[in-house]
Image (spheres, helix red, strand yellow):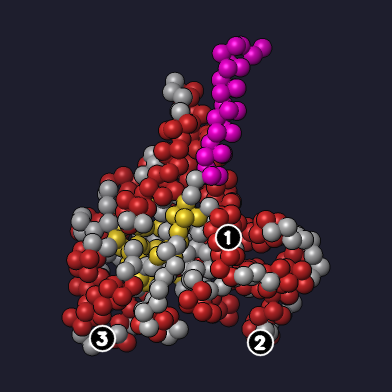
Amino acid sequence: MVTSTESQLLRRATELRAQVELIVNSTAVADVHTHLFPPAFNEMCLSGIDELLTYHYLTAEMFRSAKISFDQFWQLSKTEQADLVWKTLFVDNTPTSEATRGVISVLEVFGLDTRAVNLKEARAFFGGRNLSEHIDQVFDIARVSGVVMTNDPLDEAEGPIWTSGVELDHRFKSSLRLDRLLNDWERAADTLTELRKFLDRWIERMRPVYMGVSLPAEFKFPSQDVRDKLLREVVLPAAKGHGLAVTLMVGVRRRVNPNLREAGDGVAKADVTAVERICAAYPDVKFLATFLSRENQHELCVAARKFNNLMPFGCWWFLNNPSIVSEITRQRLELLGTSFIPQHSDARVLEQLIYKWKHARKEIADALCDTYEQLLLSGRAVTADEISRDVSRLFSGNCRDWLGL
Ligand code: RAT
Ligand code: ZN
């Protein structure tokens, strides 16, 4: 028999769930890491069904089911590649993976046939959109207030756009990506003093909200390698000098299968103590960190408890699957309260903002509901204002505090 106290608790829990979902779904989010570009970056601004279907998360999956060689596939035009991905993953198979379900979520939002036998209708729809209105609508549907791009000064297509003095759409913030600069620094300068000047010039030009780098699983700090020297003598002093945060994305194994091109990278467990040591050595630099391996997530939370200049963010790339996002978000709520950034989209194609945030919001709402329910059972009910405060902090407050976004 259900007692009246139990039934009151049950009612409160149901109301709570509805309240949390409403707040999570309506609160605008600041997207701290994407590969999106505004139209001023010409062909780097990707949108539409062909781009959605040739996303590298999907091409990797396509090769598991289609009978086509790597060479044959890469020789196809983008439209032909998209046709093959659609036929393989959406017509001949059920789109159960997160990346395929994402495309379904996007088609559904725009009222397009999610069971179409070909891409005619979707192509006509996206092809007929006015780009600037489409961008407004996508940001609106995804309830994204702004996105951080990934900007590489050494990129041949991107560099000249910056030097020509591009005007940025206010929703697109820049971040200065250091990968190429660290791996190939002699392309930018002859000496480390010159490299620092190069970096200073690009910081002035791009006005980034942070400097970011992806790092292999073997990343160590301190270390005897060139990267260590560049970090200590150029990057970290520049971060300090300009008051810029540094974003560390650790655990990627580049080109595990080069035949897959952009889709060919893998993952390995990294050493979180390297990040701890960097945080300890540079207490006045703010670090954002994300690890690609599921096995590193708990250690990252513990490291963040020890160093308040460390902000865990996102469920990156192979972790961006509902079951794993759920697990990581719950772990972070238990270990860090609301002092973390739960997700970033990593979107490369505009409309991905819609599905990546829709799916993330669902997991974040569920995790928050369960957390508040446990709190209720322990003797404290949260108020609507408190829920709003928590969600705002998770979705934009921590980004604002750390990056001035
Ligand atoms: O998630 C991705 O799209 C990856 O390809 C990478 O770009 C990764 O996010 C990165 O920024 O290195
Ligand atoms: Zn990325």
On the rendered image, what quadrant is the C terminus found in? bottom left
Circle 2 SS class: helix
Q: Nearer the viewer, residue 153 or 89?
A: 153
Residue at 34%, 72% in the rendered image: 206
Q: Residue at x 50, y 38 (%)?
A: 368
Q: Which residue is mark 1?
A: 138
Tell which circle, 1 or 2, labels the residue nearer the N-terminal end: 2
Asked if the magenta segment contains residue 18, the reply would be: yes
Distance from disc 3 to disc 1, alpha carbons, whole Å, reads 40 Å
Residue placed under numbered mark 3 in the picture: 189
Task: Examine the rendered structure and indicate whether residue 135 appears above or below residue 185.
Answer: above
User: Circle 2 sits on which residue?
Assistant: 75
Q: Range of the magenta residues?
A: 1-26
Amino acid type of disc 2? Gln
Q: Is mark 2 within 8 Å of ligand 1?
A: no
Question: Where, quadrant-wise, is the N terminus in this rendering?
Answer: top right
In x, y percent, where is residue 364?
52, 44
Q: Quadrant of residue 194?
A: bottom left
Return the x and y of residue 26 as percentages of the image width and height.
53, 44
